[in-house]
Amino acid sequence: KLTHGYINPEHIICQNSLNENKPIFVNLFKFLISDVQENQEYLPENYADLPLISQDRFAIVKIIKEASEGYSFENLFDYCNELLIQPEVTEGDLNRFVDNFENC
C-alpha cells in the first residue's frame, strides 16, 4: 500500500468524465521531497502517534465531510463527524463507510 501522510484538497486533482468527478492523482512529488507537516488541518491531533495510512484515512474522511457540507447529505456529514472524533479512523471504519454510503 502506498501512503501519503499528508493528504489535503490541494493534493487531489479530479477528472470530470461522463459527469462524474473522480480523483485521479495525489500530489506525490511534494510527499517525496518533504516529510514536514506544514499544515495540520487535515491531520488528527494525535498524528505523531499514528501510522501514515491512519493519517491518510483521517484526511479523506475530513475532505468528504467538507464536501458534504452545503448539500443535503446530513447523514454523511454526521457519520464523518463521528469518525473524526475517534482516536483513529481504521480500515474497518472506511469499509463500513463505503458500505453505508455507496448507493447515496
Image (cartoon, grey):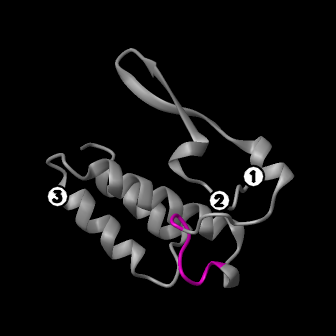
Q: CA distance from mark 2 to mark 3?
A: 26 Å
2 or 3: mark nearer the eye: 2
The reply to whether the magenta stretch includes residue 26 is: no
Q: Amino acid at mark 3?
A: Glu
Q: Residue at x 26, y 60 (%)?
A: 77
x, y (%) of residue 33? Answer: 85, 51
Q: Which residues are magenta?
A: 41-47
| Residue 75 position by quadrant | bottom left
Q: Earlier in the sequence, mark 3 or mark 1?
A: 1
- Mark drawn on residue 6: 2
SS of the residue under disc 3: helix
Q: Give the residue at mark 3.
A: 74
68 lies left or right of 49: left
Q: Earlier in the sequence, mark 2 or mark 3?
A: 2
Confirm or deny contact between disc 2 and disc 3 (CB under 8 A). no
Q: Amino acid at mark 1?
A: Leu
Q: Give the residue at mark 1.
A: 2
Work out whether residue 98 can be spotted: yes
x, y (%) of residue 50? Answer: 67, 79
| Residue 78 position by quadrant | bottom left
